[in-house]
Image (cartoon, grey):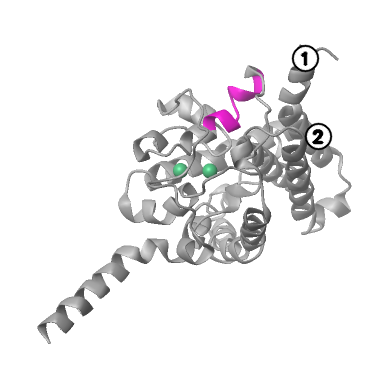
Amino acid sequence: MSSGIKKLAVDCIPPATVAAVVAFWAWAPDSMIANPWTLLVVNSVVTAFVLGLELVFERHEGWRINRQEFFTDLFYFVLINTVISRMAFILSEAPLHALKETWGIATPWVTAMPFLAQVALVVFLWEFGQYWMHRLMHNWEPFWLTHAPHHHITQLNAMKGAVGNPIELFLISLGIVALFDVSPAAYLCAFAVTNVVATYAHANVKSDPPLFYSFFFTTIRHHSFHHSVGYENTRCNYGNSLILIDRMFGTYKEGEGILVGQDDRRRLTIWEQFVFPFKPLIAMVERRKGSSSAAG
Ligand SMILES: [Zn+2]
Ligand SMILES: [Zn+2]
C-alpha cells in the first residue's frame, strides 16, 4: 500500500468508528436497546479498540501509556460510568422527566423526525450545553478550580476524557435532553457518538480525519491545542465533541499541542485531583492556624 493511501486509511478510522456505532444503534434489536448495559458495553468496546490503536498508530512517544496512567484512567472511566452517571440520573435526568410529566411538555415533532436527524438533534443539544459549561469553567475561577485537574494531565490517551475532579465530572453530566421525546435508540446513539468523538479527541492515535469530519467534530489536533501548557492558550476549542460550536461562537483556533499540562506540568495524584477545588480553602485555614500559633 502506498504511504498516501495508508495515511488516508488511518485518518479515516475515527469517521469509520462513528459510522459503525451509528449503524449499530440504527439496527440493534429492541431487546438490546432496552438493556441498560448496552451503552456501557458499546462505550467500553470503543475505548478498548482506541487503546489498541494507540499501540499500533502512536501519535507521540511522550504520550505512551504506562501502568500508572492506565490504572488512573481506568479508575476515572469506572467512576464516571457508575457513581457520577447514577448521580446525574438521580439529581438531573429523573427530576427533568418528572417536570416534563407535570408540565405536560411534549415534542411529537422530534419523535416524527428520521433516526439520524434525532441523533443529530440530541448531539447538538447536549454539546451546546457542554460548550457553555466548559467555557464558563475557563472564565470563572470557582468553576476553573473544578476543571483544572483535567488540564493538569501531562499526556493524552483514550480514557483521559474521563479524568477530572468529581465535581467537574458531575457538572459535565448535566443536560436538558430529557425534556425531548427522542426515540431510545437515537438517544443512546447520540451519547455513543459523542463518546467515540471525545475518546479519539483525547487519544494518542495519529489519525487526522478529513475536513468532512473535522469541520463538525472535535479531533485530537483541536483538543490537544486546548490542553496546551499556558492557561491563556487553553481558552479556545471548548467543544467536547462538536468543534462546530466553537466555529459558530468565534472560539475556534487552529493548532496542535504536544506538550500538555498546566503550570510546571507536574502530574497530579488522584487525591490531589479530588482536593484541588478546595486548595484555596485549605490554604486559608492553614494561614489562620499559622497566624494564631504565631500570636500564641
Ligand atoms: Zn478545558
Ligand atoms: Zn480534555
Q: What residue type is labelled 1?
A: Ser
| 211 shown above or below 43 | above
Circle 1 sits on which residue?
A: 3
Q: Which residue lies furthest to the left in this view?
A: 295
| 274 shown above or below 42 | below
Q: Nearer the viewer, residue 32 or 112?
A: 32
Circle 2 sits on which residue?
A: 20
Q: Position of residue 125 (x, y in %)?
A: 55, 40
Can you tell which quarter of the image residue 53 is in?
A: top right
Q: Nearer the viewer, residue 279 or 104?
A: 279
The residue lying at 41 percent from left, 46 percent from top is: 262
Q: In this view, does 193 lie to the left or right of 283?
A: right
Residue 221: mark: none
Residue 218 falls within the magenta-colored stretch: yes
Q: Nearer the viewer, residue 57 or 240?
A: 57
Q: What residue type is labelled 2?
A: Ala
Image quarter where the N terminus lies is: top right
Q: Position of residue 273 (x, y in %)?
A: 48, 61
Can you tell which quarter of the image residue 209 is in?
A: top right
Can you tell which quarter of the image residue 194 is in?
A: top right
Q: Marks 2 and 1, Cα distance to the nearest angstrom?
A: 25 Å
| 80 shown above or below 217 | below
Secondary structure state at the residue bearing disc 1: helix
The residue lying at 74 percent from left, 32 percent from top is: 57
Q: Is residue 142 left or right of residue 168?
A: left
